[in-house]
Amino acid sequence: MAATVEGPELEAAAAAGDASEDSDAGSRALPFLGSNRLSLDLYPRGCQQLLHLCVQQPLQLLQVEFLRLSTHEDPQLLEATLAQLPQSLSCLRSLVLKGGQRRDTLGACLRGALTNLPAGLSGLAHLAHLDLSFNSLETLPACVLRMRGLGALLLSHNCLSELPEALGAIPALTFLAVTHNRLQTLPPALGALSTLQRLDLSQNLLDTLPPEIGGLGSLLELNLASNRLQSLPASLAGLRSLRLLVLHSNLLASVPAGLARLPFLTRLDLRDNQLRDLPPELLDAPFVRLQGNPLGEASPGAPSSPVAALIPEMPRLFLTSDLDSFPVTPRGCSVTLACGVRLQFPAGATATPITIRYRLLLPEPGLVPLGPHDALLSHVLELQPHGVAFQQDVGLWLLFTPPRARRCREVVVRTRNDNSWGDLETYLEEEAPQNGPPSFLRPVTVQLPLPSGITGLSLDRSRLHLLYWAPPAATWDDITAQVGLELTHLYARFQVTHFSWYWLWYTTKNCVGGLARKAWERLRLHRVNLIALQRRRDPEQVLLQCLPRNKVDATLRRLLERYRGPEPSDTVEMFEGEEFFAAFERGIDVDADRPDCVEGRICFVFYSHLKNVKEVYVTTALDREAQAVRGQVSFYRGAVPVQVPEEAEAARQRKGADALWMATLPIKLPRLRGSEGPRRGAGLSLAPLNLGDAETGFLTQSNLLSVAGRLGPDWPAVALHLGVSYRELQRIRHEFRDDLDGQIRHMLFSWAERQAGQPGAVGLLVQALEQSDRQDVAEEVRAVLELGRRKYQDGIQRTGLAPKDSALPGSSAPQPPEPAQA
């Protein structure tokens, strides 16, 4: 039990790392503190910095909820720092005490110095997340078992050989990860964790599971990969909530038949086991992975079975991994190590499954004797266990070319037996020309960006999948479990030894089932409705929107106080990111220059999480004083075509699986009575404006009308920022009382006429909009200006006043990324 350090002892401990620190060191540590997060794991002397903060006790420290601290520190200083947490960070919700920031000479992550925790840490009443990965824990600290509010506990990459029975008494635990440890058994009390949803026990030494594990009624994901399991308890069939069950790389000869009846199971990974027979329900299930099993192989004296023909073979994919071991089964395997060595184990090389471990040793003169004409081409590779006798010849290749290879007369591979070295028989082999994708002399690192809004810190690895496709095959394979994915803050990296297709996929679902294309369609295809509404005060202002079916009713309830229109269109299926456009027909056209308007057609790109809404002004060339104009707006898929059908009936006749036409909604512009005139210009002198200039961009009459229609009740703030006096503002309100639109238009056009011909007027308008918190309208004005600059540039190029290769700064748009083909 660690004693609490207070007063002078605390200050002495804080100054132990560097006696030169002065009294304001705590304030200099404050830059590490961002909002309610304190990240000191990547900074030197993180414990010392935290102790100084505890001495100073700044107000920000009381608000910290997330703390990250490296355990590559002096053990005594680390213990003294952790003892202060309950008093100084009483609101702590997440505590990350990880090693692994440092690496040895071979690049492997080093474990931290943490072997225990102070008993006082159980006083962190709000702690819900505890990460103790990459440390040297041999037993679970007792204080962890008293943290009643703990929801997530991460213990990966430690030295745990068992888990205590008291672990089953943590009532709120939902996530437990104990990967890469030395667990041989599990406590029966583990089945009492009624709230547990994710359990990861991969990369351990488990050979049996307690029957009580079937009591985990809330469990969604269970990972038991790379253990020594020979059988499974029948109680696993009681995990009725289970969706993901990973059991690859074990010694299983059979699985309980009840697994086929789990109602929500979407992935069952049974690769690389000793399965010779399976229930028919599992053999036919598309979510079951069975590669690497001797299914259908006849045991001695048993009749042959054709089941093996039903099991697809794994693709010949050579991917490196950060693991230090790999399984070898009687079926054989081909393994590429990160050090540039490929091992080929033919079928029948071993009669029983074994696990091969490897490590690299630095070449030392005493370890590797070299003659006067010898050159060392690689590090020393040690394979364990020693003394294994294989029944077939095992192949070994170096995947890199030695320096001046053409001048090397001989390459020798030496092996050590007891204390003597011997030469293996080697020969040079001419590499045949390859018709497929090229191989590499060294593995190539592929780096792919993580999805937008996802970082390596917030990533849920269960939702990240790496899919592989080798033409001419017609399927994608999920190879996430076979590859050592290295995650940084913004990227995911992995290594390959040949070109092919790789797809990094982050999904909101828990796993990828079936073919990737079907999964994509199932997850990303939406049923949407199209809406066209007209403003009640001004029918020439039309709101267009495309939104998922489940959002239609709520959106209409919110909009119908200010807008009116037809019922939403019939349901249409649309992909995420699909482009479509709206075309006004039958005498109605768009009354503005917009960057998203091409030949009178408004372009959209559908995203389910966005509003997909656009407000436009429409006009007509027909005489509205004689009668109302009854037009329509039609929605079409894909890019804007050369010609849009003027009649929706023609589009309906061509409607099919790939039809461009999606929907048509009526638009009615009412008759103008007498001298009523256009409402948007009522009472205003609409002389041509000269606001801005052609080179930097200008605003037309229609542009200002569009801005006026967007301001609403915010117009007084915009007017004051434009320099309109308060007396004039009150006069406009009185003159156009009960007419909000008239107030806005009069203010804006009066100001614009006074600014005509003066430089900087457009910039003043944009600044006033931003100061009034109308960034949306300011962005629209900027888009109009950019469109004007583009048109001006095109014009001077056509007249020969500028070289054809000239371009405006920032005018080139980034191209969309192509599929990641490595």
Image (cartoon, rainbow, N blue to C red):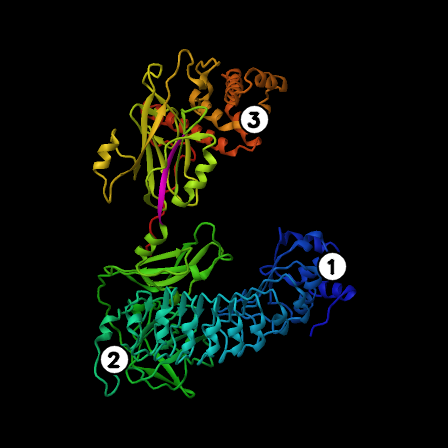
Looking at the image, is mark 2 or mark 3 earlier in the sequence?
2
Relative to 117, residue 768 above or below:
above
Does the magenta-highlighted stretch encompass residue 526? yes
* Residue 325 image offset from top left, x and y in percent: 41, 75
The answer to whether residue 90 is visible is yes
The answer to whether residue 136 is visible is no
Looking at the image, is mark 2 or mark 1 earlier in the sequence?
1
* Residue 98 image offset from top left, x and y in percent: 57, 66
Q: On the picture, is 307 further left or further right than 686?
A: left
Camera-nearest label, 3 or 1: 3
* Residue 287 image offset from top left, x and y in percent: 33, 65
**Disc 1, SS:** helix
Which residue is disc 1 drawn over?
Answer: 55
Toward the viewer: 203 or 235?
A: 235
Toward the viewer: 749 or 135?
A: 749
Q: Amino acid at mark 3?
A: Val
Question: Which segment is the magenta one?
Answer: 525-533
Which residue is disc 3 drawn over?
Answer: 718
**Residue 16 figure quarter:** bottom right
Camera-nearest label, 2 or 1: 2
Q: Would you call the spot at circle 2 few (<14 residues within 10 Å), some (14-19), or many (20 or more)?
A: some
**Residue 252 figure quarter:** bottom left
Q: Amino acid at mark 1?
A: Val
**Residue 570 figure quarter:** top left
Q: On the picture, is 773 further left or further right than 53?
A: left
Measure the C-alpha gap from mark 2 to mark 3.
Answer: 80 Å
Does the magenta-highlighted stretch encompass residue 15? no
